[in-house]
Every structure is written in C-alpha cells, then in structure tokens.
Amino acid sequence: MAIEELHRKMMSEVYEGGVRDTRVLGAMNGLERHRFVPSRVRHLSYENSALEIDEGQSISQPLMVGLMTQELEVEDENLVFEVGTGSGYQAAILSKLCRRVYTVERHKDLYTDADKLFLELGLSNIVTLYGDGMEGSWHGGPEVFDRIMVTASAQDEIPPKLLSCLKEGGLMVIPVGEEGEVQSLLKVRKGKDGLDVETLADVRFVPLLSGKG
Ligand code: SAH
C-alpha cells in the first residue's frame, strides 16, 4: 500500500476511536508520522500502535495522540508546554493548533534529533528544551502556559512545579500512576478555587523521571 493510503487508513482508525475535532484531525492528516519514526520500524509508521524509538522510549499510539490533543482543547493563541518530546510527533501536532509549543526532553539524543527534524519540517513555532520538565527553571515564572501536556506518567501526583506554571483557567492532560501498572489519564482544569480533575482513561506510558537521561 502507498504511504498516502496507509495514512488514510490510520486516520479513519483515529476517527473511529473517537477523535472528531476537525482541527485535530486536520493536524494529524497534515503530518507524516513516518518522519518521526526510526528507520528500523518505519514500515509500521501508520499502524495504530505505539512504537519504540531510541533510549527505550516510545512514540504514542496515534489514537492516543489524537484523544489527548482533543482533550487539551488547544486554541490558536495558546502557549503550550509539552513534557517528553520523544520523537517530536505530539509536539508537531500541537504546533499546528496553537501560537507556540515549548517541548522538553531529558534525553540529549532525542532532544537533538527532534530539534533537527522540526527545522527540516519548517515547524518554526516549536521551542525545544533539554532537561527535566518537572524542574521550574524554564517555565519563566508562574502561570505562563495556557495548556500543558505530559506524555510520560507521573508516579503518584501531579508535579507541583508544572501545576504552578499553568495559567488560571488553563488545562493539563497528564497520565498518573506507577510504571508497568494501569495509569490514569487525567484532565486537570485550574480554576480560581482549585483543581477540577477528571479521569479520562486507563493508559500505559513510560515513566516521568527526574534529572537528565
Ligand atoms: N511525546 C512523545 C512521547 C515520548 S515518550 C512522542 O510524541 O513521541 C515520553 C518521553 O518523555 C520520553 O522521551 C522520555 O525520555 C521523556 N521524559 C520522561 N521524563 C521526563 C522529564 N522529567 N522531563 C522531560 N522529558 C521526560
């Protein structure tokens, strides 16, 4: 099957899985996933499954990327922070939907590769950062971001420094739970009087780890 055909098939699986937001579908339709996948598994790029990238990490399943992006309710003017750049695929999707994406990765090689790829693809509204996304240093102060997406699982709580850089009225999507166990994908709304937390699904993500890789 030609790439275009495989891509179309993947998109119909994403749609059938519940992604109906036309902006999200448009963004996923406009980006070739095979650009983000290492050559040894490139033939599987348009399967609706997670794939191994380098450093023992993974690129999320397309349906999960679509659902998480849809739940984040990203708007044109938003500043979005992503923790866990990995392959860069999720950041690239987000970049089509908002003003600017800041994405941070703790593995140097993944960071470098993603940075190069964004340049090649002309995704000039993505700022790549290297280090531990749970640290406060690059948040540039409290309440900076409209949206935060975390693509690795926090062990037992929503990292407080991440919460502090979310604007009031902002949204965060984050998996929480132990590695290897069923984790909960949470949607967190930061209100004036506290957090409104909704559990979206049972998920499995690689762990959110502190420090550099
Ligand atoms: N969004 C990615 C998914 C990558 S998997 C994609 O679309 O491909 C999650 C990534 O989070 C891994 O690359 C892992 O190295 C990274 N990660 C884990 N803990 C982190 C932390 N504290 N700060 C930054 N990145 C982290």
Image (spheres, rainbow, N blue to C red):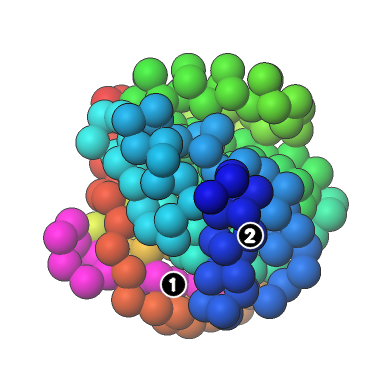
Q: Label 1 sits on what residue type? A: Leu
Q: CA distance from mark 1 to mark 2?
A: 29 Å
Residue 117 appears in which quarter of the rendering? Answer: top right
User: The residue tagged with tag 1: helix, strand or loop?
Assistant: strand
User: Percent from the top left, x then y, of residue 164?
Assistant: 53, 53
Q: Is residue 158 left or right of residue 32?
A: left
User: Percent from the top left, x then y, of residue 112?
Assistant: 48, 17
Which residue lies most toward the right here? 77
User: Percent from the top left, x then y, of residue 12?
Assistant: 60, 70
Q: From the image, state whether disc 1 or disc 2 is nearer to you.
A: 2
Q: Which mark is residue 90?
A: none
User: Badge 1: few (under 14), some or many (20 or more) residues near its Cα, within 10 Å?
Assistant: many
Q: Which residue is mark 2?
A: 8
Q: Which residue is mark 1?
A: 186
Residue 3 appears in which quarter of the rendering? Answer: top right
- Would residue 116 be visible to someone looking at this image? yes
Lower position in the chain sequence, tag 1 or tag 2 = 2
Give the residues in magenta.
177-189
